[in-house]
């Protein structure tokens, strides 16, 4: 039995969400103290030195990590190729490399600078990297939080499942990618409003409400379960094919709904609330929270007004045909349907109204739509129309940038599209249950004496992590294979490898009984004892730059690749550099500090992907 909720209560609930998110925007941080990264600091100095020699202001963008070279007796961290500069300046690249190296040599951030043929090779000093390790320990959870975009606001719209249907596996990618991107944008300084644009309006709701009266006229609406509603809806959709009467009935109900029939709106609110309860249970499991859940239904009234306005809008590009085909055209190319023949507003009309609402309510800098590839051309046209009608522009002339963050399909083990309809996959809930069970078995096989409560606590976290890692590991624009067996494989580049390395670090640190406070007071050496130690410190010092790169490219897979490499490097460090039984206490402190810094970086990094860490596996 579902809870009784009226349409007015539904509106009040959403309005309070808007008010809450608006508070966030109003409190937008205006701080100007810029937190940069280690690279920001030394690259600025590098640029300053190189400006006159290379005739450029941005030598940094050509810096690369060079591959290992057998002919070189030392290991540079970066290399800068001189070819393009030499060509532009009409000089010999080898001479240029030599000149540049001479200019850089006095910089103390580098322990070695050398021209090797047409390249300039650089190695950061151990000293500066050791300072960075200390900084990681000092900043802890705040390590990697940047201020690049402080003062800017972003709307991230994601998940957006359709109401009165089970939460399908097809909305999983949007949920996972959107949540992670929201976290990356926060990390670079944006104030973020997370919005869920639920599919809760449209002619199908006319059919749903008509079906209830048709098949269960004597039942209280609040007595229906989600399954009851789905069953009646499916039956109605079937029988409608043969029955013009039912077709008319569905339309009539929708017309009443859109016109604001109080009884139907209240029923609609009950159905909405029922779905919301189900979705919320999913979001809880996935640790996803929205600021607002402004579904399509929230914009019905606005869209009716907007469609009328669009018909009268004078713009050189924008043409509205509202006779036979109620659509907006731009340059006879971008066609966006805004009304049905019967005069109802459709999906796109509500989207256009949403654009205007967001601009006028929040006036954000960017608005991201995390939606699958299938809607790419739709969004291209939608954005063009919204821009031509200046719906994304405010009276002060500022405008928000509209951006479709597209992604590929989810495929089953045999490479076919996963869908809720064909029965190849069930509800996301069932999939998650199955994944939890498999994870629990795996963990139990390695820890036969773990008690059941702890086992399931860990398994639930690992299962969610496995699902998210599997998704974000792939470039979002590619298709993703959804294969539970693969996700849990140890040694297959999965989250299991990552979490396993993490738990190992935790147990080392627990055994040593060492704390950050103690380490921060410890005397550290000026040099690392192995090349791996240098490299892992270097990689951890690049964390902030990776956060920035990932946020800018809206590409969590770049970050997953980074973490994967870091895990491997840490594996080598763990093998090579023991932390107990050392005669040299300074070296011991340094190595323990590296483990600690690694733990912090992994915890923060996995947090940006929304993957929970566990201390045992
Ligand atoms: N509910 C839609 C679907 O399941 C996705 C909504 C995408 N967002 C938007 N603003 N149109 O296909």
Image: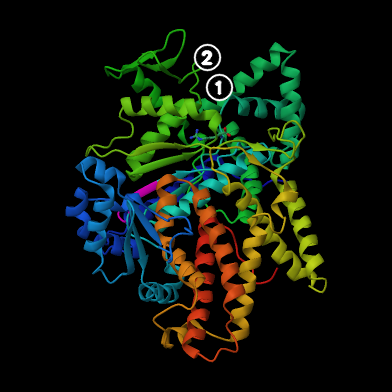
Q: Residue at x 34, y 45 (%)?
A: 364
Looking at the image, can residue 261 be seen?
Answer: no
Looking at the image, can residue 103 be seen?
Answer: yes
329 relative to 95, above or below: above
Q: Which numbered dot is residue 342?
A: 2
* Left or right: 523, with 606 as reference point: left
Magenta-colored span: 149-154
As helix, strand or loop, the secondary structure at mark 1 comes to: helix
| Distance from the alpha carbon under mark 2 to that under mark 1 | 9 Å
Q: Which residue is mark 1?
A: 255
Q: Nearer the viewer, residue 556 or 169?
A: 556
Q: Position of residue 316 (x, y in %)?
A: 26, 17
> Residue 24: which quarter of the image?
bottom left
520 relative to 499, above or below: below
Circles 2 and 1: CB distance less than 8 Å? yes
> Residue 34: which quarter of the image?
bottom left
- Point out the tag, 2 or 1, that comes first from the N-terminus: 1
Q: How many marks?
A: 2
Q: Nearer the viewer, residue 398 or 547?
A: 547
As for residue 460 lying within the magenta part, the answer is no
Which residue is at the far bottom? 583
């Amino acid at each position: 039995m579902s809870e009784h909720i009226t349409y007015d209560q539904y509106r009040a609930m959403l309005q309070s969400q808007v008010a809450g998110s608006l508070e966030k925007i109003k409190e937008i941080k205006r701080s100007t103290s810029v937190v940069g990264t280690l690279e920001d600091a030394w690259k600025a100095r590098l640029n300053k030195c190189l400006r006159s020699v290379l005739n450029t202001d941005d030598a940094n963008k050509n810096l690369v990590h060079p591959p290992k070279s057998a002919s070189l007796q030392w290991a540079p961290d970066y290399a800068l190729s001189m070819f393009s500069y030499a060509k532009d300046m009409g000089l010999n690249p080898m001479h240029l490399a030599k000149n540049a190296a001479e200019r850089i040599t006095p910089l103390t951030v580098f322990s070695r600078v050398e021209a090797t043929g047409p390249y300039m090779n650089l190695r950061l000093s151990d000293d500066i990297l050791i300072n960075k390790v200390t900084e990681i320990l000092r900043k802890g959870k705040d390590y990697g939080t940047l201020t690049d975009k402080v003062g800017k606001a972003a709307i991230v719209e994601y998940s957006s499942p359709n109401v009165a249907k089970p939460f399908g596996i097809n909305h999983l990618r949007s949920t996972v990618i959107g949540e992670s991107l929201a976290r990356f944008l926060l990390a670079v300084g944006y104030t973020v409003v997370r919005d869920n644009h639920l599919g809760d309006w449209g002619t199908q709701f006319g059919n749903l409400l008509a079906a209830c009266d048709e098949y269960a006229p004597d039942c209280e609406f609040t007595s229906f379960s989600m399954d009851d509603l789905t069953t009646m809806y499916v039956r109605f959709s079937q029988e409608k094919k043969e029955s013009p009467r039912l077709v008319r009935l569905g339309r009539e109900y929708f017309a009443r709904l859109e016109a604001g029939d109080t009884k139907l709106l209240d029923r609609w609110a009950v159905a909405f609330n029922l779905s919301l309860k189900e979705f919320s249970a999913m979001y809880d499991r996935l640790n996803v929270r929205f600021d607002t859940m402004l579904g399509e239904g929230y914009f019905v009234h606005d869209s009716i007004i907007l469609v009328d306005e669009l018909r009268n809008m004078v713009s050189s590009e924008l043409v509205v045909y509202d006779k036979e085909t109620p659509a907006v055209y731009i340059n006879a190319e971008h066609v966006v349907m805004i009304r049905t023949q019967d005069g109802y507003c459709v999906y796109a009309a509500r989207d256009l109204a949403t654009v205007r609402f967001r601009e006028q309510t929040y006036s954000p800098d960017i608005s991201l739509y995390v939606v699958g590839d299938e809607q790419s051309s739709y969004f291209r046209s939608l954005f063009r129309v919204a821009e031509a009608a200046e719906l994304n522009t405010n009276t002060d002339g500022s405008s928000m940038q509209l951006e479709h963050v597209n992604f590929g399909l989810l495929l089953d083990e045999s490479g076919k599209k996963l869908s809720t309809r064909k029965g190849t996959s069930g509800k996301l809930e069932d999939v998650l249950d199955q994944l939890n069970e498999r994870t629990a078995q795996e963990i139990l096989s390695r820890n036969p004496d773990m008690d059941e409560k702890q086992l399931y606590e860990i398994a639930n976290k690992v299962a969610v992590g496995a699902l998210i890692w599997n998704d974000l590991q792939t470039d979002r624009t590619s298709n993703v294979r959804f294969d539970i067996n693969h996700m849990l494989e140890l040694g297959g580049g999965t989250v299991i490898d990552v979490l396993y390395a993490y738990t190992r670090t935790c147990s080392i640190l627990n055994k040593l009984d060492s704390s950050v406070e103690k380490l921060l007071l410890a005397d550290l050496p000026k040099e690392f004892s192995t090349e791996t130690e240098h490299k892992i410190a270097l990689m951890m010092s690049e964390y902030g730059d990776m956060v920035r790169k990932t946020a800018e490219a809206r590409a969590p897979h770049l970050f997953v690749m980074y973490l994967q490499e870091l895990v491997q490097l840490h594996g080598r460090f763990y093998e090579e550099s023991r932390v107990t039984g050392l005669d040299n206490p300074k070296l011991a402190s340094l190595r323990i500090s590296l483990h600690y810094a690694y733990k912090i970086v992994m915890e923060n990094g996995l947090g940006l992907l929304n993957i929970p860490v566990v201390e045992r596996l």
